[in-house]
Image (spheres, rainbow, N blue to C red):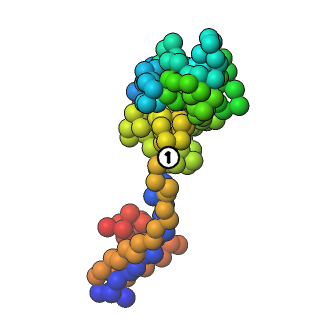
Amino acid sequence: GDGKYVQFNVTYSTTSVITKAELKNYYNKLDKEKILVSNEPTTTVNGLIKADQSPNQANGVAADEPLKLSDVITLSYDDEAGTLTATQNATNVASNKVKDLKFGTATTGSYTAGKEITVPATATITAGTSTTADFNLDDPSKAFKFDPSSAEISGFVTGQAGQTLKASIKIINAKEESIDVDSSSHRTAEDLAE
């Protein structure tokens, strides 16, 4: 009745959907040529190494070039589909590992003892779907980073998962009014909403 309140209980999700424009902007900001692992190892400091061809392939020596993102991952964006895909570079990657290069020191036996570098599996982000809420597009520099402790390269950065929340909306001093829908009254739902 008049002077009372009406309460609506609303359930909603905090999940947001990434647009094509946001995803393309993120793709454009990704540094495809960023260095993941430097090729400046020493006898005590780890770096990118290859097998010494002489005198002993068990020994590690500095790789010819640093390892860049484009060496192991190919990034592509499809405007029409609104998809961003990270694909392993088959020339340099096999079974999720970088071919012929390891992370270790440049010393006797270090190539054999060096860590194989793990590359993330192929992944795709599709704009306009709720699953994209699991990706964090705020800082492109955080994607595809090398972790020296595990010798793993990360993939796209996951974001905070969406939550289902509840809220109560209370309208106070509600006014109760009814209309006869069969009458010739010009009152409308918009009038009542006011």
| Number of dots carrying numbers | 1
Amino acid carrying label 1: it is Thr
Q: Nearer the viewer, residue 12 or 134?
A: 134
Residue 181 shown left or right of residue 5 in the figure: right
- Which residue is drawn at the image coordinates 43% and 30% (left, top)? 44
- Which residue is drawn at the image coordinates 30% and 80% (left, top)? 172
Q: Nearer the viewer, residue 165 or 44?
A: 44
Q: Can see residue 33?
A: yes
Q: Nearer the viewer, residue 102 or 131?
A: 102
Q: Quadrant of residue 166?
A: bottom left
Residue to which mark 1 is pinned: 158
- x and y percentages locating residue 157 in the rendered image: 48, 42
| Residue 190 against residue 4 in the figure, above or below | above
- x and y percentages locating residue 142 in the rendered image: 41, 38
Q: Nearer the viewer, residue 32 or 193?
A: 32
Residue 42 shown left or right of residue 96 in the figure: left
Quadrant containing the C terminus in the rendered view = bottom left
Crowding around mark 1 (Cα neighbors within 10 Å: few <14, some 14 to 19, many 20+) is few
Quadrant containing the N terminus in the rendered view = bottom left
| Residue 169 against residue 98 in the figure, above or below | below
- Which residue is drawn at the image coordinates 43% and 24% (left, top)? 42
| Residue 25 against residue 164 in the figure, above or below | above
- Which residue is drawn at the image coordinates 49% and 42% (left, top)? 149
Q: Quadrant of residue 113?
A: top right
- x and y percentages locating residue 65 in the rendered image: 49, 14
Residue furthest out toward the right: 95
Q: Secondary structure at mark 1?
A: loop
- x and y percentages locating residue 162 in the rendered image: 49, 57
Q: Can see residue 117?
A: no
